[in-house]
Amino acid sequence: MTTIRVWFTKTGEASYISHLDLQRVMGRAMRRAGLPVWYSLGFNPHIYITFALPLSLGQESEVESVDFKTESDPAQLDFEAMAKALTEALPRGIDVVKIYPADTDATRIASARYQIRVPGDWTAALAAYNAAAEAAVEKKTKRGVKTLNLKDTVPAIESWLRDGETCFVLTLPAGSTGLNLNPSLILGWLEQHHGLPASAAHVLRSAIYLENGAKFLG
Amino acid sequence: MFDEKLKAALAAVQKPGRYTGGEPGCVYKDKAELDLRFAFCFPDTYEVGMSFLGMKILYELLNQNPRWWCERAFMPWVDMKAEMEKRSIPLYCLESKDPLTAFDVVGFTLQYELSYTNILAMLDMAGIPLRAADRGEEWPLVVAGGPCVCNAEPLADFIDMMMLGEGEEQLPAVCELVCKAKAEKWEKKRLLRAMADIPGCYVPSLYDVQYNEDGTIRAVQPLDGVPAVVKKAIIRDMDSQPLPTHFVVPMIGAVHDRAQIEVLRGCVRGCRFCQAGFLYRPMRQRSADKLNQAARDLCGNTGYDEVSLTSLSTSDHSQLEPLLDELLEWTPGEHVNISLPSLRIDNFSESLIAKTTKVRKSGLTFAPEAGTQRLRDVINKNVTWDEIEKSCRIAFDAGYTSVKLYFMMGLPTETLEDIEGIAETAQKIVDLYYKNPDRPKGKGAQVTISVACFVPKPHTPFQFWPQDTKEMLEEKQKHLIHSVKSRKITVRYHDSKTSFLEAVFAKGDRRLGRVLEEAYRRGCYFDGWDDQFHYDTWLEVFRDLGVDMAFYANRAIPTDEITPWDHLYYGVDKRYLVSEYEKAMQAQTTPPCNRKCSGCGANKLLGGACFDYDQSMVHEDR
């Protein structure tokens, strides 16, 4: 049994597919594309797939990935043809970049990079963030709500203006172990304290990194 | 038009996936290449609409024409409606994101009376004037189809044209006429007059309704030479119509999110309360080979892992078991489950259950509809206790532990004894389970009885019968609860207020148009959703406009009275409805029409006998 990784993008309309729905969409697309996926055993066999790092509803990404298992010999598989067939079977906005035997363990993911654009000039808001001694937000976790100081993780944010939008890049801790920080927490703080329109912000996940700084995909 | 305004609205609502489109199977076309743009509007949520097979059939059919583009619109949920209004986003179709005003035809499907206000809401959200008389040449043509068109008189003021019957041939004919009218620059008036000549097309404005002083109808006068009676469109040979094999596959879970194969249309049973059973006569079935092939293609194209054999009564298909055998040749290998949603309790066989349990075991659902044999005879639900017992025993032997039973309350001639019969029926099933020595260890039986309030519907023998008042229904509900003794039995019942309003609009006439409009103006929409239903507002509107709800719902209609729907003909003669009504009062039954023709008149739609009676389509008693 080999684990195969599908690297895909999630943009435009597809950014409104929730993580739960994406599991169903991906499973059906794999069936439609005729991928040699392994089914779990038991009375109700189903496709066994795992996503590396869930993406929030409304955010876009260039670096999503899902793993499936196969009993086929990877040397015999035509990954390019599979990628093409799977892209055709997926909804608009989800494009397969590459399919390949998984080379790294998704549990090693340590951080993710986000490119953020907000309509209007919000450099003053970001300057205020940089100047603040503390930026406390409430983060909901499975164990309840806890307060977090964003400045501990992101001491300063460098921003610039382009085409009437305020742009900045955030690299935030991510992964299945340890702290996981969603860019919406920082956008939410900026909205709450400085009126930045968080719901109008465009968030694109552009890279995922391992603990040693190497890229998880690509 | 996937613009910043829309993105901001989507960021603020629950389930934005309802409003984005882009699902696998979505059809996109180049607007420059089109002769016709059709907005198929479903006046309920995305999840409900995407479960509806009729939309899938017509979407695929219209889009087969390279010069037509059929797109979809649904009623936005309350949060999205507010966001769209706040940001001045007009109601749009999901594929192009263009507003409804960009379309030639805006077509609604009428599935449920309590979605009528949603139609007004959708027109309003698109900025389209609600009343047909207020829409000049510049507005899209607003049309409607679906079962409620059999008496959508309350919507007569708002809809330009309604389509009775089956749309597979009729809707393309309508679209062709619209294209011709566009090319030749006809006025809307001329187009509508020409449409009235297409089978099943009903232009309400070309019929003048006159009333008597007591509020009943004196006459319905056809104008401008249109047919006095509009006859529904029908597909004579179901095998001539390919099944849809390219569903748009919703990404957020729809209510029925699976491949659906329509095995037959119509129903042979003749249950006297069932509107669908009368509207879709005669029953016509598809051949097993075509169904099997379509199921396989559909699963392949959609990636669905469940295929449902849908119809009003799937087990009445004469080739059901051969069909299941064909399906079972490939479904296990493809990891596809088969589900049979409409099984009849009286021909539920061991081999049938063996075939479905090969794939998946879930709860069983039966619909005895009434609690005593007398009342089942009245409604012509030809099911006996022995058959119920036999089916349940087979099911329990096969390992099923939960049974769900559907009943109705408020049926004609019903007494409290019949209500007690519902509880007794459920109790006898529980007892049956515990008598089975092979029942699974440690698993208790669970019998759920779900009780709906009976709503008399047009074009059925019970159209003449007055609905029970809300008070009567509530009293009966209480009596049922008291009659249930076992904790193994769960009782669910429907809100009688909803059923009352449903009856008013089901049997309503054109004078209810202003009631609908006023109720919508006062904030009524999504009336079919309990949490959005404002019963008190409805009562106020009826009172303020001086319209008596009981006149429509709780009044017995003399069999010789002209009903608002007498000029809409679905193939069943009114004299037949009257004779069935009279038989019901005597508790006399009528056999299924593939066993013996009872002369309802629907055979004339096919131009011959409905069935080859030598090759009995009725299952032998197994």
Image (cartoon, helix red, strand yellow):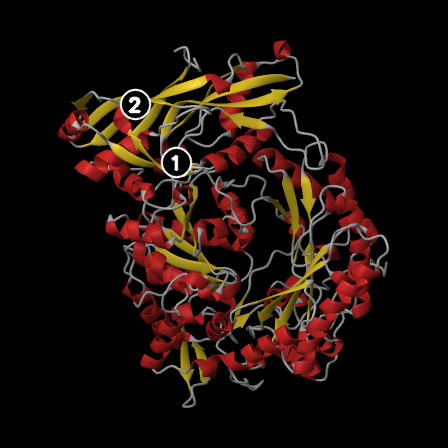
Q: Secondary structure at mark 1?
A: loop
Label 2 packing within 10 angstroms: few (<14), some (14-19), many (20+): few
Looking at the image, which residue is at 53% across and 47% down?
A: B56
Near-viewer residue (B147 or A96): A96
Near-viewer residue (B321 or B238): B321
Looking at the image, which residue is at 33% across and 56% down?
A: B186
Pinpoint residue B570: horizontal percent, then vertical percent: 58, 68
Quadrant housing residue B297: top right
Q: Which residue is mark 1?
A: A57
Q: Which chain contains the residue that carries disc 1? A: A
Looking at the image, which residue is at 40% across and 62% down?
A: B532
Q: Quadrant of the N terminus of chain A?
A: top right
Residue type, numbered disc 1: Leu
Pinpoint residue B501: horizontal percent, then vertical percent: 46, 73
Tag count in the figure? Answer: 2
Q: Are marks 1 and 2 in contact (CB under 8 Å)?
A: no
Q: Is residue B543 above or below residue B319?
A: below
Residue type, numbered disc 2: Thr
Near-viewer residue (B178 or A17): A17
Q: Secondary structure at mark 2?
A: helix
Q: Is residue B254 above or below residue B483?
A: above
The tag earlier along the polypeptide, 1 or 2, is 1
Q: Which residue is mark 2?
A: A153
**Relative to residue A161, is residue B261 drawn left or right?**
right
